[in-house]
Image (spheres, rainbow, N blue to C red):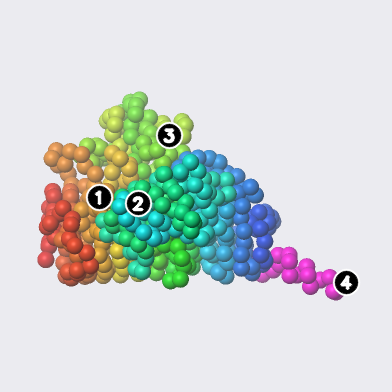
Amino acid sequence: MKKFVLPLILFLPAAIASAGVREVKIPKCHGIKLNSIISKELKKLPENDTLKVILTGKTYSFTPDKGIERTLWISNHDQDNPKSVGLMLENCSNVIIEGNDADFIFEGRMLPIAAVNVTNLSISGIHIDFTTPHIAQVEVIENQDGMITYRPAEWVDYEIRDGKFIHKGTGWEIQPSWGIPFEKETRHIVYRQGDIGLGTNNVTVLPDGLLRAPWNNPALIPGTVIAMRGWGRPTPGIFIDGCRDVNLTDVKVHYAEGMGLLAQNTENITLNRFGVCLRGDNDPRYFTTQADATHFSSCWGKITSIDGLYEGMMDDAINVHGTYLRISEVVDSTEVIARYMHGQSYGFEWGAPGETIQLIAPKTMEISSPEAEIASIQQLNDKEFRIKFSAPLNPQVEQGIENLTRTPEVEFCRNTIRNNRARGALFSTPRKTLCADNLFDHTSGSAILLCGDCNGWFETGACRDVTIRGNRFVNALTSQYQFTNAVISIYPEIPDLKSQTKFFHSGITITDNVFETFDSPILYAKSVDGLIFLNNTIIKTTAYPPYHPQKCPIFLEKVTAAQIQ
């Protein structure tokens, strides 16, 4: 019998229980088996004990046909349910997953990792990637007379169908509609080329296998590398919903078709050395995710990101906000029907009885009611809620409602943000926010944005205590995007600023930062009560020609109690 024991130890998970911790070692296997083992172990785990999963294999493969099918409403993503989930953790507590640098490799369209209603979750040492990203990377070979010859990267699966460039993968295909061009050597996004049209129509296949198409863009010199994209963002790499006390350490998302990480309605999230990043300097790819690296919607407690690396993503490194509802019907002075407004943000829980709310006038972004509690809330459908307040508030149709309870403190420190589209860090929370000792290197748009918008994105809310300290900003603003008026842009969306009588943001301190910039605008601020800008160093570079329409280094619009030195 002994000669049969060794193979069983090698290929079956080993479980060791000690001092309230049950250890399970899982070797290389298909994702469905990994799910099954973890699920079974959780079901037999004694209450209050901890399950520690140790991955001993190097690669774990996941395919959509064997994924866990779930209907998941994910903030700021396409609501195309159901989703095929790779690793599904739900309705459990005290879980530790030690990846030991394991690769989770996905095919098709999948949500790699989802945690729903999980308390005390720790994941470390996992790399998330896809065999075929939904972004097609090509290199410009020749650009002459309005025609560009280009070569797709070797991993890109495509065909030319009726003259159209069709990018393909398991269960999906896309004709890319727009793209992001990168400088080949530096990996910076090409100057003033943040979003470009593509030559994916009337494509000719040349005898040497290269592709040629009508494509008039002189900025795309030979050697330029282009990430060709579609508009979809079905799922993030990691989805966290309704959880508490989540810690991700040394977890890397190398590709996701939506955001790298999307967390919503969750209390306390810590990211240690988290990365939405390439696989090192020799990675042939130039891109990572289709949207933000990390995004936090209606969370509370504290959000921490320390020593992270965020690069090559097609949007911001971090965005922290809540979601405004709009009142569609007034029942009486204490009760309303309110609805989600944005096409990618609906379906998920918005509030609970006992939580604090206030009303907002969208045109001026002024608070239009005292704070009150939610007495009751009923979700009527995917987009609408019946909300009863604890006190009369004189609600009106079209007013916004903000949930003040689901707002977090933020610590974003010692991170590197580089070579990405749009902006660097976005903060919209009234609680203490510290953005310190980060490197913002070629963020393309503004490095930091403090926004607030009850008119377009419907992302709350006003900042009350923000410290931006000891950061280094290198050649931001190489392209213009929404709200990118300066390297640091304090830009709430206020349609009727002239009629506003109460300031939106307050308590913002910007000190001891270094701005290395080729252009003029350093700081733009609108509707702020209390702004300090002191002891910052501005170094003029010659990296690119100045072009920004804002010529003043510091431009203040409806700002009071400002100290600028």
Q: Please tell me which residue is depicted at 78% across the width and 70% down the height of the picture.
A: 7
Magenta stretch in the rendered image:
1-23
Q: Quadrant of the N terminus?
A: bottom right
Mark 1 → mark 3, Cα distance in angstroms: 27 Å
At label 4, counting other C-alpha atoms closer than 10 Å, the crowd grade (few under 14, some 14-19, many 20 or more) is few
Pick out the residue farthest to the right: 1
Q: Is residue 237 magenta?
A: no
Q: Are marks 2 and 1 in contact (CB under 8 Å)?
A: no
Label whose residue precedes the other's in the sequence (2 or 3): 2
Residue 62 in sight: yes
Quadrant in the rendering for residue 102: bottom right
Residue depth check, mark 4 versus mark 2: number of the one nearer the observer: 2
Label 1's element?
loop
Label whose residue precedes the other's in the sequence (4 or 2): 4
Instruction: Say what amino acid the circle numbered 3 marks.
Output: Lys
Task: Give the residue at mark 3.
Answer: 383
Mark 4 → mark 3, Cα distance in angstroms: 62 Å
Q: Quadrant of the C terminus?
A: bottom left
Label whose residue precedes the other's in the sequence (2 or 1): 2
Left or right, 292 with reference to 21: left
Instruction: Say what amino acid the circle numbered 1 marks.
Output: Phe
Label 3's element?
loop
Query: Percent from the top left, x then y, of residue 84?
Result: 58, 47
Label whose residue precedes the other's in the sequence (4 or 3): 4
Q: Please tell me which residue is depicted at 60% across the width and 45% down the height of the picture.
A: 69
